[in-house]
């Protein structure tokens, strides 16, 4: 197991290299002049050249990339053009907000998704099952920003139970995380339902019944454990979806995470921040995938032993 | 030996297909005595598995038992509630299946899967269950039982898994073990070992066995009595020796002739012409008529009843009516 994890981590290095090159190039090859954005369009040519020189923009691209790589390896993501603060400090401040939001969203998504999915599979073809299918189909097609605004309108503005936006307490986290997790919960519910139904057809379920085991126990032990193998993989893939969704939801609820930081920096052409965030989102994605594979091996003994 | 423990009476099982009920088991009756082995033979699709699953009440929708009784221990199993039936399953009547590769849960250890049935039907503690499970593994001829207890199914061969299935089936000393083609998926030497094992356990525990197979060699080896099924009905029932030496029904005779014999090498094996008619397709006359070499006019119009043709020997055929 340890060897497997080390191997996987080493395997990430070339991918990270490629991502760093892409994020570097992406920023340098897109139109828009960062210097003019930083100092305003009215600066004279001499100052412009001086600034360009000091930022190293005269050097060939590979030299600039080498410098960039050296910097990020020491954890230095440069200074934000816009706020003139250290990008890594800003990320450090915001990282936990996004992490908290994503995990809280995944928590809701898993709880709702698994319970609804298993229940509909156990009571297949009942009215509850049909209701589940209809509502999950609807929920999947609702855009997050819209759903977020609806929740905000009902629970924050009209009923006043929750704050409309901001951060700081657990209560602030509720609406954004439910917004973010809701769509994923529907995806997980549908997926869980179909994989539970599939596993229910397996011969070992008949064996368990022939032992005299209860149907409910069979579903919650024998079937669920097997169905989870597929659900975990799918859930892991949804993390990417959540990271993307977080960008939107953070904006709607003014949640001070990396997503709203990304939007701010894109609007401001704040290249150092954009570069750092692209890199960071990719790293998160890789780590999540690794965690998924590890947890996959926890439920599937066959993988554990190989 | 002669006390009946299971009595199946005019059992009928149907599947619902597009509002139409298709009867796949039609009025089957038989008795199983304590400690004996009853064989059920017949071509694929004749309803052997459905019959045995009915006894366990494990037919799932759209199938259901439409009529008849299954009397075990003076109780009609078809009338029991699901809760009452759970106490019977695995405890008094247990069942092992054809596919040892898929009949065990791949994500649980062997030990956990044997413990499960012991914990369900006895008051054993977890530790006691573990001891009993290991004891069971030893009884089914598995050396290194402690190690196998901790293994997962994928680490075991097919023969080993079938031994584990037998260990699960026998763990609570059932009065009746239903084995649905327990050796079909295994190679020949392993088949013999498994049959041998079942026989040994049966002698020790005085368990009755219903052995479903289409291998008449296995029947000759294992069974006391045989039931020959055709298209959802019993066509002949006899003591094994009687059936092999004095078969009555043309279908049974066909089955015996199509059996490969190791003594004489015929150039070609005999085959019964035609195929089993799809369930529900024959409503009139003898179900075997269109494949029968001895068909007479009467066969097309009326279905023969099952009648006594000798000592403990019954047959459903106009030639012997
Ligand atoms: N779920 C089902 N839906 C509809 N018909 C079914 C279903 N299961 C079984 N049948 C029908 O019931 C009949 C008997 O099936 P059964 O499985 O008992 O045959 P079998 O004698 O065990 O055959 P085999 O030797 O292949 O195991 C078959 O004609 C089959 O088509
Ligand atoms: Mg069968």
Image: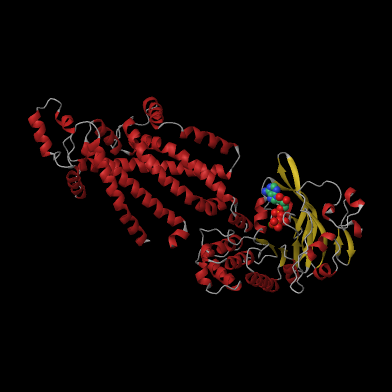
Q: Is residue A152 above or below residue B182?
A: above
Locate the C terminus of chain B by quadrant: bottom right
Query: Residue B281 location, x and y as percent?
Result: 78, 46
Q: Residue furthest left?
A: A46
Query: Residue B231 location, x and y as percent?
Result: 78, 53
Is residue A101 left or right of B51 when viewed as pictured?
A: left
Q: Is residue B198 above or below residue B289?
A: below
Q: Residue at x 32, y 46 (%)?
A: A284
Q: Nearer the viewer, residue A212 or A63?
A: A63
Find residue B56 and report its image quarter. bottom right
Query: Residue A273 location, x and y as percent?
Result: 23, 38
Is residue A192 left or right of A6 when viewed as pictured?
A: right
Is residue B247 left or right of B156 when viewed as pictured?
A: right
Q: Nearer the viewer, residue A233 or B206?
A: A233
Query: Residue B137 location, x and y as percent?
Result: 57, 70
Q: Is residue A88 above or below residue B44?
A: above
């Amino acid at each position: 197991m340890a060897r497997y994890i080390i191997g996987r981590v080493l395997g990430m290095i070339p991918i990270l290299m490629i991502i760093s090159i892409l994020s570097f190039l992406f920023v340098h090859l897109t139109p828009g002049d960062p210097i003019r954005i930083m100092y305003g369009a009215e600066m004279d040519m001499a100052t412009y050249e001086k600034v360009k020189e000091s930022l190293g923009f005269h050097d060939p691209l590979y030299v600039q990339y080498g410098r960039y790589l050296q910097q990020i390896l020491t954890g230095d993501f440069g200074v934000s053009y816009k706020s003139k603060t250290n990008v890594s400090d800003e990320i450090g401040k915001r990282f936990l907000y996004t992490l908290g939001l994503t995990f809280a969203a995944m928590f809701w998504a898993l709880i709702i998704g698994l319970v609804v999915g298993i229940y509909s599979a156990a009571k297949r073809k009942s009215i509850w099952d049909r209701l589940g299918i209809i509502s999950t189909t609807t929920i999947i097609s609702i855009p997050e920003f819209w759903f977020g605004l609806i929740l905000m309108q009902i629970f924050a503005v009209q009923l006043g139970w929750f704050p409309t936006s901001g951060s700081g307490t657990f209560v602030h986290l509720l609406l954004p995380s439910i917004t973010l997790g809701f769509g994923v919960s529907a995806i997980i519910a549908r997926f869980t339902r179909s994989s539970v139904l599939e596993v229910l057809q397996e011969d070992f379920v008949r064996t368990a019944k022939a032992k005299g085991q209860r149907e409910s126990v069979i579903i919650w032990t024998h079937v669920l454990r097997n169905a989870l193998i597929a659900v975990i993989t799918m859930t892991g893939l949804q993390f990417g979806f959540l990271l993307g969704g977080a960008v939107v939801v953070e904006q709607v609820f003014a949640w001070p995470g990396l997503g709203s930081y990304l939007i701010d920096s894109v609007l401001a052409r704040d290249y150092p921040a954009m570069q750092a965030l692209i890199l960071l989102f990719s790293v998160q994605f890789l780590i999540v995938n690794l965690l998924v594979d590890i947890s996959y091996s926890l439920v599937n003994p066959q993988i554990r032993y190989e | 030996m002669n006390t009946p423990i299971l009595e199946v009476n005019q059992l009928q099982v149907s599947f619902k297909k597009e509002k139409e009920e298709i009867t796949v088991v039609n009025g089957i009756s038989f008795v199983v005595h304590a400690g004996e082995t009853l064989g059920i033979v017949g071509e694929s699709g004749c309803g052997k598995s459905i019959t045995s699953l009915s006894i366990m009440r494990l037919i799932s929708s759209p199938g259901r038992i439409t009529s008849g009784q299954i009397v075990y221990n003076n109780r009609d199993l078809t009338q029991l509630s699901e809760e009452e039936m759970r106490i019977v399953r695995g405890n008094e009547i247990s069942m092992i299946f054809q596919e040892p590769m898929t009949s065990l849960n791949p994500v649980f250890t062997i030990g956990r899967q044997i413990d499960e049935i012991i914990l369900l039907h006895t008051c054993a503690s977890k530790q006691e269950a573990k001891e009993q499970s290991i004891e069971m593994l030893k009884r089914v001829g598995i050396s290194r039982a402690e190690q196998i207890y901790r293994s997962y199914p994928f680490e075991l061969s097919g023969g080993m898994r079938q031994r584990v299935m037998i260990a699960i089936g026998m763990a609570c000393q059932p009065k009746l073990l239903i084995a649905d083609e327990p050796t079909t998926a295994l190679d020949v030497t392993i088949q013999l070992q498994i049959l041998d094992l079942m026989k040994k356990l049966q002698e020790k525990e005085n368990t009755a066995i219903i052995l479903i197979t289409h291998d008449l060699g296995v029947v000759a080896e294992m069974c006391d009595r045989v039931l020959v099924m055709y298209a959802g009905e019993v066509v002949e029932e006899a003591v094994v020796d009687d059936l092999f030496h004095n078969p009555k029904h043309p279908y049974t005779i066909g089955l015996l002739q199509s059996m490969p014999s190791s003594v004489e090498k015929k150039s070609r094996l005999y085959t019964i012409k035609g195929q089993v008619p799809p369930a529900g397709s024959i409503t009139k006359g003898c179900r075997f008529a269109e494949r029968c070499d001895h068909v007479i006019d009467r066969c097309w119009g009326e279905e023969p009843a099952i009648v006594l043709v000798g000592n403990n020997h019954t047959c459903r055929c106009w030639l012997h009516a």
